[in-house]
Image: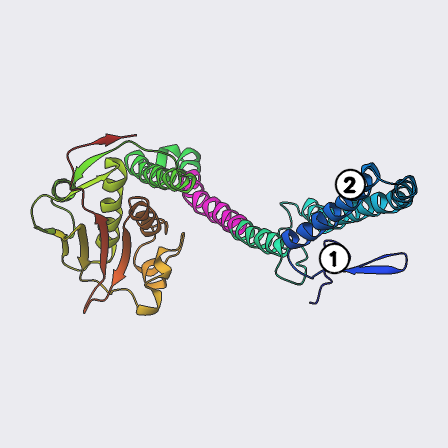
Amino acid sequence: MAVRLVPLIPRSIRMGAFSVRLPPRSIRARLTTVAALVAAAAFTAGAMLALAAVPGPVAGERRALLWAALALPFVLPAAGWVTWSAARSALRPIERIRAELAEITGKDLSRRVTVPDGCDEIAGLAITTNHTLDRLERSAETQRRFVADASHELRSPISALRAQLEVACSHPAETDWALASARALAAADRLTCLIDELLMLARLDAGAATLRRVVDMCALAEEQARRREGARVPVHLRLGGPAPVLGSPVQLDRLLTNLLDNATRHAATRIDLSVAVRGSEVVVTVTDDGDGIPPQDRERVFERFTRLESARAKDGGGSGLGLPLSREIAVAHGGSLIAADHRSGARLVAVLPLHAGPPAETG
């Protein structure tokens, strides 16, 4: 859509029988031109006054004073008018942008300010303002979608827990209270896990500072393997020596927990967990022998509350937050997390910066 440029000052200023043509350049150039005009007017007035003060014949002095008296009423008002016009024209497009911004509210972030033609500073301000509004709109939409998905995910286990308790209370004599308690405890555990993941995601989104110290990823991997001894799918470790990373122990442990939980839900017979140091990076790889992740979905699985159809059919206990949270943790530590190519099953690779300095603790 074509928009009309409101110039900083009129390109052609008419004053009586003559006109001044101003160049269509940037605000700085136009203000420089205005300053030059004002300086020229002041210089002319000063020259006339100086000429009147030079000793000489009486007729010459009178003539100089006459010229000065005739010129000053025209030169000074003209200079003042040019300056006033320049300031007024300079503020007009800025006022337009301010008024349009004032009409944009949080309920409707789709509106944008008018971008004037040209490449001057005001056009740059309008473009930057629209880019900022684009980011705000995307952030607000992501937040609304996140709240809606979180509400849906929280409602499911709460509804299941309520239904179990209502049935048990309605028929207390016929209820197997041990089984009902176990089911209620499982629903409560799922709620706790989901709330913990939501809180950690909220902290990561807000950029909250966490206590950081040097963490050996090999030690974390060994601890994870010990916790899963006797599980349905065994975890096979392959460690390459100390792999220090400067980070939050809680968050890095959550990263490994989520990756291994995801592998456990999809693995058939085994899970391989390896930690290796390659150059200045620590590479953590979790591989399972399950159905794998289709190539077209290898990026989509890192979107919040996204669960593939195969995952829904195999396991109904996931929330779709494990892998997105793991990637957020890796990124917050200066690393990355991807779903890599693998012949059979899924392979998730987390890369974290190697801590080469002495032990340190930051908050």
Q: Residue at x 35, y 65 (%)?
A: 297
State the scheme by which the image is colored.
rainbow
Q: Quadrant of the C terminus?
A: top left
Q: Is residue 182 visible?
A: yes
The answer to whether the residues at label 1 and label 2 have Cβ atoms under 8 Å apart is no
Residue at the farthest left position: 241
Q: Is label 2 in a helix, a strand or a loop?
A: helix
Q: Is label 1 in a helix, a strand or a loop?
A: loop
- Residue designated by label 1: 6
- Left or right: where 200 falls relative to 42: left
Residue 326 vertical position relative to residue 54 in the rendered view, above or below: below
Q: Residue flagged by tag 2: what amino acid is it?
A: Gly
Q: Quadrant of the N terminus?
A: bottom right
Residue 108 vertical position relative to residue 357 in the rendered view, above or below: below
Is most of the magenta stretch helix, strand or loop?
helix
Q: Residue flagged by tag 1: what amino acid is it?
A: Val
Examine the image and state in which quarter residue 163 appears: top left
- Residue designated by label 2: 46
The magenta span reads 139-164
Q: Is residue 111 visible?
A: no
